[in-house]
Structures are given as structure tokens and as C-alpha cells.
Amino acid sequence: MLDQFWYPLFLFPAIPLMMTTFGNRYASLSALIRKMHDEIVIQNIESPNRSRFLDELKILNQRMTLVRLMQTLSAISFIFNLLTIFFGYLKLFDISVICFGLAVIIFTTAIITFIIEIQLSVKALKKHLEDLKEI
């Protein structure tokens, strides 16, 4: 049972690394949304282009929701990983194993959410490229 105490140490560096990645995605998405907001509102984009921008903003809103979910799931997974180490330290191995299992399941869900967000990202880029087809 003592060998299982070391398993969470393998997951320990992965979670903060992914949280940093998710945070960077959030920062770039928020900058893009602000830029698009300025283009639509300040420059008063006309109707045909405005609908494309609004479609893109809808996708960006979905992506922001997914990024927030990814960050939240990663943080919860990190907490369960820390609890795994803590309960292992207290030699409560049954609780430690349960916490580790939860950490892995929650982190897997965060990664699946990341994959979905990437797919939406590609969809948004395709929307953006639609302008070039018309030229």
C-alpha cells in the first residue's frame, strides 16, 4: 500500500502546467473579445460584417465558458491530488486512493473539455477565414 503513496507525485506537476496553459488561453481569448468589441461598437461595423462578428463572439463566449470550466476542474483536481498526498502522509491509504482516483477523473474531464474548446477554436478561425473567401 505504501507504493501507492507516490502515485500522486506523478500527477502533481502536470496539473499546474495545464492550469497555466488554460490561463494563457483565457488571457488571449479576453484580449480577442475586447478587440472585437472595439471593432463592432466603436467603428460601428455595418450589418453584413456585423453578423459574422456576432457569430464569432458567440463562439468566443462558449470558449470562455469552457476555459473557465477547465480551470475550475484543474483546480479541484489539484486539491484532490494534494489531499491524496496528505491522507497518504497520515497513512489513511483507502481515503488517499479514493482522492487520487477523483483527481484523475476530474483532471481527465478538464482535458476532455480542453479538446472540445480546441474544436471550437478551429470553428472560430474558420469563421474568421470566411472573409478571405469573398475576396
Image (cartoon, rainbow, N blue to C red):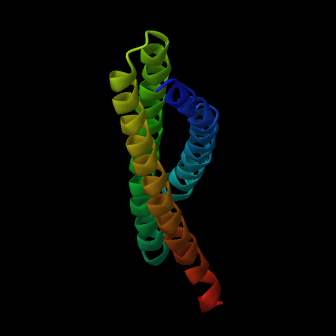
Q: Of all residues shown, which one is farthest toward the bottom?
A: 134
Residue 134 in picture, x, y percent from top left: 60, 90
Q: Quadrant of the C terminus?
A: bottom right
Residue 103 appears anywhere in the view: yes
Foreground residue among 121 and 112: 112
Foreground residue among 33 and 59: 59
Location of residue 62 with respect to 3 vertically, above or below: below
Location of residue 44 with respect to 24 vertically, above or below: below
Could you tell whether 48 is left or right of 121 in the image? left
Q: Residue at x 58, y 71 (%)?
A: 125
Q: Residue at x 47, y 46 (%)?
A: 67
Residue 128 in picture, x, y percent from top left: 57, 73
Q: Of all residues shown, which one is farthest toward the front?
A: 1
Q: Quadrant of residue 129?
A: bottom right
Q: Quadrant of residue 91?
A: top left
Residue 44 appears anywhere in the view: no
Residue 66 in picture, x, y percent from top left: 41, 50
Residue 19 in picture, x, y percent from top left: 57, 37
Location of residue 46 with respect to 111 vertically, above or below: below
Q: Residue at x 49, y 74 (%)?
A: 49
Foreground residue among 90 and 132: 90
Q: How many marks?
A: 0
Foreground residue among 59 and 33: 59
